[in-house]
Amino acid sequence: MPLVLNEEQNMLRDSAKDFCTNSAPIAQFRQLRDDKIEAGFDQQTWQQMIELGWTGITVPEEFGGLGFGFLGLGVVLEECGRTLTASPLLSTAIGAAAIADGGSGEQKSALLPKVAEGELLLALAVEESAHHNPYGAATRAEKAGSTYQVTGKKTFVIDGNVADKLIVVARTSGNAGDRDGLTLLLVDRQSAGVTVTKTIMTDSRNAANISFDGANGELLGAEGNGADLLDRTLDVARILLSAEMLGGTQECFERTVEYLKVREQFGSPIGSFQGLQHRASVMFCEVEMSKSVVLEALSALDDPDDIAELASLAKTRLNDTFNLVSAESIQMHGGIGMTDEYDIGFFMKRSRVCEAAFGNSSFHRDRYATIQGY
Amino acid sequence: MPLVLNEEQNMLRDSAKDFCTNSAPIAQFRQLRDDKIEAGFDQQTWQQMIELGWTGITVPEEFGGLGFGFLGLGVVLEECGRTLTASPLLSTAIGAAAIADGGSGEQKSALLPKVAEGELLLALAVEESAHHNPYGAATRAEKAGSTYQVTGKKTFVIDGNVADKLIVVARTSGNAGDRDGLTLLLVDRQSAGVTVTKTIMTDSRNAANISFDGANGELLGAEGNGADLLDRTLDVARILLSAEMLGGTQECFERTVEYLKVREQFGSPIGSFQGLQHRASVMFCEVEMSKSVVLEALSALDDPDDIAELASLAKTRLNDTFNLVSAESIQMHGGIGMTDEYDIGFFMKRSRVCEAAFGNSSFHRDRYATIQGY
Amino acid sequence: MNLDTFRAETREWLEANCPQSMRNNPFHFEDAHEVYSTDDAIVWRDRMAAKGWTAPTWPKAYGGGGMDYDTHRVFQEEMAAIKALPGATGMGLAMIGPTLMEYGTEEQRQRHIPKIITGEVTWCQGYSEPGSGSDLASLQTKAVLKDGKFVLNGQKIWTSGAQHADWMFALVRTDPNAAKHDGISFVLLDMHQSGVTIKPIPLISGSSPFCETFFDDAVALEEDLVSELNKGWSVGKRLLQYERSAAPSRAKKKGKPANPYALTAKEYIGEIDGKIADSEAREKIVKQTMLEKSMQLTVKRVFEESKSGKAPGATTSIFKLVGSTISKESSALQSELRGTAGAGWEGDSFTEKELDACRGWLRDRAVTIYGGTNEVQMNIISKRVLGLPDK
Amino acid sequence: MNLDTFRAETREWLEANCPQSMRNNPFHFEDAHEVYSTDDAIVWRDRMAAKGWTAPTWPKAYGGGGMDYDTHRVFQEEMAAIKALPGATGMGLAMIGPTLMEYGTEEQRQRHIPKIITGEVTWCQGYSEPGSGSDLASLQTKAVLKDGKFVLNGQKIWTSGAQHADWMFALVRTDPNAAKHDGISFVLLDMHQSGVTIKPIPLISGSSPFCETFFDDAVALEEDLVSELNKGWSVGKRLLQYERSAAPSRAKKKGKPANPYALTAKEYIGEIDGKIADSEAREKIVKQTMLEKSMQLTVKRVFEESKSGKAPGATTSIFKLVGSTISKESSALQSELRGTAGAGWEGDSFTEKELDACRGWLRDRAVTIYGGTNEVQMNIISKRVLGLPDK
């Protein structure tokens, strides 16, 4: 597949850049944080995103979406990453992908149009421990007539506090760690037996702990056989999150390069010191390679291909590069980079949380080697 | 124990520095290589080392040695490392340590005085594969009256082509990989059933493949219980080799720093470029820490202490630091560093072989964690 | 006094006099104010100060403990044995005290040092300015001498603990026309005056241990000029050396403590066959542990060398660079090993330790910046130690 | 011609004409002379040259293949499918040919390019000198124009393949009084003359692919001056860009080849439960593999961008830096994974592959030095691409 954007995607990027810069800049994010807004995002901005059609980008046209594909959504998320724009766009797109890939015809018809119209927010509830563990679910689902009763605890559910429906990874047989026996279920966040506690993370973005006590769940995909759908959904999540991380990485890098040009010490701009120049050029190489990897991974989502390797490659690379760039940016900014008043620290905090989401680099290097057979 | 040298050790160091610089400089090593001298070291130089008493440094006084301990030998080896002086000093000292620790009273009386007088060269035959594997012996030893018959193949036996006696790690029970069932045996190199093939390594130093076909072996230590003696002997080897590597590391680093001061490009000494300055200062930190670690590890050999952790720490640190410094030295020398005519490349070659001997960093990090219980 | 007797008496005294809540060493410097604000802490400080033990090696003439090298070592060991916190802490003891001992007049010493020892007066440092970080000598705060007083105008930044300090030692520009290192003086001033305004700086970690300090016709007395007029740069530089060469405490701990990273990893990652289940995490832990051990042995080596009368070598130049990197990575690792639980900011969903891990990770990004950035340390090593040329 | 027809005909022709021994791509550039000295190689070169396929995209007027972009892509794919070596190789095709196409006179093109395409004349590059490595413009070899001839005196170093070359393109100083970039000319000269002496340089890897070349009244004709007198620096720089931006071949391989490092590790280290037994080795392999894949995707991206008409962006500036680092680490890893077997120098105790691994590790230390050191590449990126200021 071509590693360049088409005209449609370029337009989407331009419009996203314009919107994020003007209508959802970092200052907005800071305000949300300082005001401790419970929803974690700005409602008006979210309405505008819906009007721009962003919630429908990956939804097929037959279900009322734009059908622009993941590459289209990726460029939008990249721009959101630059401005640290908080919204339930990513979580909902991940959930929509699970429904599109694993849902029944009925489910798709019922739910995807609502996603496209911005009327349905989704969140994926997978983790039960502090480290990513896709098959680690101990949460149980017992069949009860045509539905299931879900009991267990989930942690670090991104946007779990605002989603209308949760996609819960539960177990209908086997034990925590088994790939077999996993079942995906749709659970209404506000239904009986669901308790949601928002957790306040260092990046000031939404996450929640959720406990289920016999909550009602609707089967998504095949009972006991959810691991394939889960893998695919997680790969979507990893790649889309990598796209957002790419935006953050680039913005953080560019701000730092600009700072190196203006900050003077010892009578010269600090960017004239070769020690910093060489470190900046190493970062440039990493950023350029990150762009290529994210682009290829997004394309692979659109053009049915084996995405597992690319998802692990993308997530690893962006974990490492975002971490490198955001840490170096603090060091190169010196004291001012340590202050809360200055924005650069936000990128490091965001990097930290993104890194832990859907698998850190250690997880994905192990997975990559396993896929490649060594 | 004190982390400084006493007067005796300082005198030993000064005399070793003087001897190596004047009587066994790198030019001598180059000549040995170019002339493809079968013995791999200069006989006359070796005789002088014996006269200086070096073969007796670690041999207790009761057996005709100087009893100066491992710290004493360490400073000598460090100086030999600086000048890449080839000799069977290290291998013989390792072998002597095995005899001193595990030999019977009779064996010590018979062998250690000969070591001290330079009449007996020793070598440890432990490896059977390309990666260090202490308990990996498949070589078997069958009891036959008061002796043992040894059958199997050893590889990378340092100084195996010149040693008078080989200390062979064989197996009297169990299978390759078992810690139990190992037995150490003394085998005359020139006895029947022993075939020695010198291998030519990139560092132009001695190593050999040796096959045993029912060769006669004399028990050293307890049958089947050799692993403890082997561990201790290997730790001696690791620490002494680290001392030699420390010398090579320092020499290589100092030569590079000097080159940075004199080589000019773009109208300035290249050492004035901050990119190289910062890399040099990182190396300086590593070298300084390497000194401390080697000193502590040598002291621990003399002052009975738990040496396993320190041996793994020392070998890991010197593996990594010698590798870093010798690789950076080539890069910083540029084209001239790639030429055979220039000496700096010898250090990288020596570093490569030392790294593989008695455990690479991966081996020792794993061991260190295991010792510490995680 | 015989050392054994001293040890026995010290042990007994410490046991009787050190409040339980003060047996909790080490603590982080950012928490110093809080730790030393409790009633127990004040009791402890006063008892220690009465014996001169808040400054155990300082001359008795100024109220110090007057201990010699060996006595001090025994004292340190006994303190460490019960994890006793020092009787007092802060920049008075660590920095301006030694400086006055070296550069101050007898009158200045008499006036300031006893109050440092009793803890009556606390100090802060006024060096950095918004435009002068690594390039400290470019500082611009002006001081004009008039009628026996320096009148100060300008701004300092990163003033550690300024909001709690009684006095400041500061570098100020007294000759704007001289070359940049030659027009600087070192003065002491009272913080409790109307010309001084303090504004804490919130950091990314959420705490505010540092301040901006504004001088608006603030006053320093002429008798509080340390060393000569316009010769302050060398005093200030020397003082920074106290800071940079401050090595980790050498007091030996009894027994082998469990590896702190391994403990975290076992809790948050788990084990397989006794090994930490994530092999990369395990490798990181070994690397960090080995680095810490290497640095610890290097501190020990330098200590032994100086004890044996060797002139302090170049090795100390690595302390700040390596030490700060170790601290930074240590905190980062403690957060990282906890996964998402190490990325929590506040709230009951996280334990105290988890929140500390996250805040600590953010806080310790600073250690490679303050007190001479790692880049400045590398410049010092390459130029002063390795002798690499300037451009 | 229709592309499908072209593909079918090419495939048939290659199958019929490419000797089996030439279906062994890729090879290392140091081995080029040996690889292209066999009888098969000469047959292959002549057959390819006859069709202009040694230089497939060059104009037919000079004997080239005259292929357009899409045709060339098909051609490359078919060549790759049977792993066919190029019909010819060397600096004539890679460097001086394109340069003459851009800067040469029509007369110079007519005289030199056809012989490059047929392989009749091979070329070497005379740039570096003992005192002029990264700082190439400080070169000192003098050329004095006299009676229609340049008379050359001085010394070149790192002349790749000089011992096998017929001609050299060289940078020489024609105005010693001008500023250092302004007194340099770009000339071509015949290597088969008495004023030229060549001395191979043995390297740490044991091979000697480079030479010192001495000029002792060597002669270059005036008509072989490329571009104007004293304007050679810009020609030389442009030519270096051909070298630095030379990206790895993009031809896609069929099927998924097994990971080459994993193959080595499985042989020399072994597996536990299907994973390489040494977890650090496994991690290194993944990191190297991911880096290679990232770089490969970056080459692909740049290729697609240029195809889509986008101006070549800054991305190409990373090719040499990252590419050379990848090569160096690749070779080092192949040696390291073999343990002591990867550290053998010669003799029957080691297999050919083991010895190659060791020699390759040593040989490829050079890739981050030659053709612009990594340090120079980083300078270029930071100054030209990122716009960081000079001091």
Image: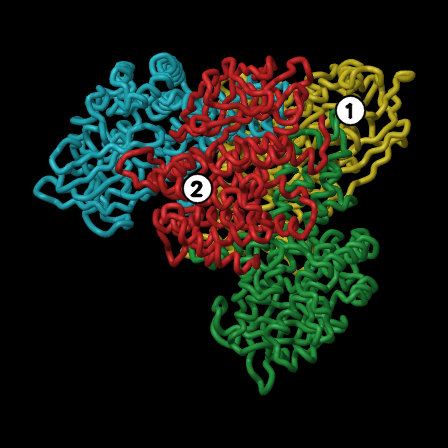
Chain colours: A green, B cyan, C yellow, D red
- x, y percentage for residue B115? 22, 24
* Secondary structure at numbered mark 2: helix
Between circles 1 and 2, the one closer to the viewer is 2
Image mark 1: chain: C
Are circles 1 and 2 on residues that touch, CB within 8 Å?
no
Q: Residue flagged by tag 1: what amino acid is it?
A: Ser
Q: Which residue appears farthest toward the left when viewing the image? A: B145
- Looking at the image, can residue B109 be seen? yes
Q: Residue flagged by tag 2: what amino acid is it?
A: Arg
Q: What mark, if any, has residue D45 been given in the picture?
A: 2
Image mark 2: chain: D
Q: Which residue: 79% across, 25% down?
A: C139
User: Residue C275 vs residue C192: left or right?
Assistant: left
- x, y percentage for residue C388? 59, 20
- Quadrant (top left, top right, bottom left, bottom right) of the N terminus of chain B: top left
Between A47 and D292, the one nearer to me in the picture = D292
Between B58 and D93, the one nearer to me in the picture = D93
- x, y percentage for residue A90? 69, 63
- x, y percentage for residue B166? 21, 33
Q: Is residue B351 above or below residue A47?
A: above
Q: Which residue appears farthest toward the bottom when viewing the image? A: A145
Q: Which residue: 29% across, 45% down?
A: B135
Q: Is residue D384 above or below residue A171?
A: above
The number of numbered discs placed on residues in the rendered structure image is 2
Between C202 and C147, the one nearer to me in the picture = C202
* Secondary structure at numbered mark 1: helix
Spatial CA distance of label 1 from label 2 is: 68 Å
Q: Which residue: 70% across, 54% down?
A: A203
Q: What mark, if any, has residue D338 been given in the picture?
A: none
Q: Is residue D379 above or below residue B15?
A: below
Question: Mark 1 sits on what residue?
Answer: C138
Q: Tell me the quarter of the picture where residue B163 sits.
A: top left
